[in-house]
Each structure stands twice: as C-alpha cells, then as structure tokens.
Image (spheres, rainbow, N blue to C red):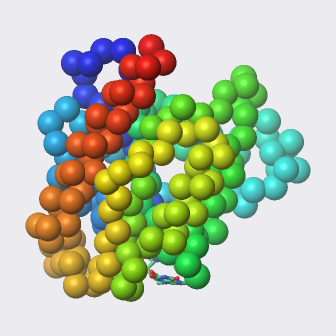
Amino acid sequence: MSNDSRHLQILAFAGSLRRNSYNRHLLETAALAVPDGIQLTVYDSIADVPLFDEDLEKEHPAGPDGVRRLRAAIAAADAVLIATPEYNQSLPGVLKNTIDWLSRKTTDGQEVLAGKPIAIIGATPGAWGTRLAQAQLRQALVATGSLVMPAPMLFVRDAARVFDADSGHYDAATQKRLTAVLQSLQRWARQQLASVD
Ligand SMILES: Cc1cc2nc3c(=O)[nH]c(=O)nc-3n(C[C@H](O)[C@H](O)[C@H](O)COP(=O)(O)O)c2cc1C
C-alpha cells in the first residue's frame, strides 16, 4: 500500500463456525472499536472452505469456490486479523485447514499470505485466553511467509463474563484492548508495506 492517506483495509475472520462464536463476536466488537484510518471488514465465515485434499486441488486449479472467495478478500486487504478459539490446547481444525489452503500457490504463482501483515487474537470462556492456540497459529502462519505482528497480544479469558449477550458486544476494557491491537496493526502494516514499496 503506497498511499498513506487512504484507510488501511483489514480483513478479519474467526476460526470458528459456531453461530454464537465468542471469536466472531470479538471481531464484531473490534469493528466498533476501530481507530481512525482503518476500515475493518468481518468476513462472514470460513464454512465454505472444503477439507484440504491435494486431489481436490488438482481438480480445481484455481481453487474451490470458498477458497477463491477468501483468497480474493485477503488479496484485496492490506492486513488480516484472525480471532482463534482454542481446541485441545491448539487451533481448531477448521482454521488450520483454511491456513493450509491459503498457503498454496494460485495458478498464477501467487501466495496470498506471503508478505501479508497479520494480527492474532482469541477468546475463550476458559482461563488461559487461547495462549496455546495463538502460539500454534503463529507458527503455522510464519511458515506461510506472512508477517505476524509480534505484539501486543490479546488473550480474552472468561469470555462469558466479559461478553454481553444482550448487546452482542464485549465490555469496555476488552474494546480498549482491541483498539490497541488495531492501532499497532495499523503501524505494523504500514511499516511492513512501506518496506516493500
Ligand atoms: C473440542 C473442543 C476442545 C476445546 N478445548 C479447549 C481448550 O483447550 N482451551 C480452551 O480454553 N477452551 C477449549 N474449548 C472450549 C472453547 O474455548 C469454547 O467452545 C469456545 O466457545 C470456542 O470458541 P467460539 O465460541 O469462538 O466457537 C474446547 C472446545 C471444544 C469443542
């Protein structure tokens, strides 16, 4: 992104298919907490990304529909924000599956995550705030050549307490932490993108 004056476009998606996902709600709250200069779009769902299979990949050289749609949305964004749940002290299979698809070269030789600034956050009703899932997601993303923001990290624990089901939003303290993550992602993305301009 060479023009500093336009809004930074962030595409956000959650690693959960659950209708009432705490992680999807976290992104929706983030959309309310955006600092100036950012446009954040919450991607509807990764539900239409099929199970990765190299045979399926050969049958669909341009990618199955759900993969093509997500790749196009990521390619059009300056940066990505991922909210991951934690399953069995790791990232959910649906999210890892999505990263595996995104890591593959497109027919024109593009790797959509390579060089893409990415921030990771996560929420859990448990006590540890998705620390282990985020660490493993970070490791997988590094393998894709994406530029994962080192800090600040956001581990939302006790999600049932800090999320208000009536309003559909997280509490003010969580909103403040989300704004801080987005401000850092804005700086991180501008630095990273300027260095390749
Ligand atoms: C298979 C499975 C394993 C889970 N393992 C963990 C875990 O290791 N750590 C944790 O904090 N929560 C764990 N949970 C609880 C999830 O944090 C909880 O279901 C959460 O709501 C999932 O995120 P979502 O609301 O965005 O879908 C697990 C849930 C499932 C279904």
Say which quarter of the image contains residue 94: bottom right
Q: Which residue is located at x 50 percent, y 39 percent?
A: 147
Vertical order, 179 against 96 (above or below): above
Vertical order, 39 against 157 (above or below): above
Can residue 173 be seen from the camera position used here? yes
Q: Which residue is located at x 81 percent, y 45 percent?
A: 57
- In x, y percent, where is residue 136? 58, 63
Q: Which residue is located at x 75 percent, y 56 percent?
A: 52
Can residue 44 be seen from the camera position used here? no
In the picture provided, is 83 more to the left or to the right than 178?
Answer: right
Tally the marks. Answer: 0
**Which residue is at the front of the view, 110 or 116?**
116
Say which quarter of the image contains residue 139: bottom right
Say which quarter of the image contains residue 6: top left
Q: Can you say which quadrant of the picture contains the C terminus?
A: top left
- In x, y percent, where is residue 86? 50, 75
- In x, y percent, where is residue 100? 69, 52
Vertical order, 108 against 92 (above or below): above
Vertical order, 57 against 83 (above or below): above
- In x, y percent, where is residue 60? 79, 41
Q: Which residue is located at x 36 percent, y 15 percent?
A: 2
Q: Can you say which quadrant of the picture contains the N terminus?
A: top left
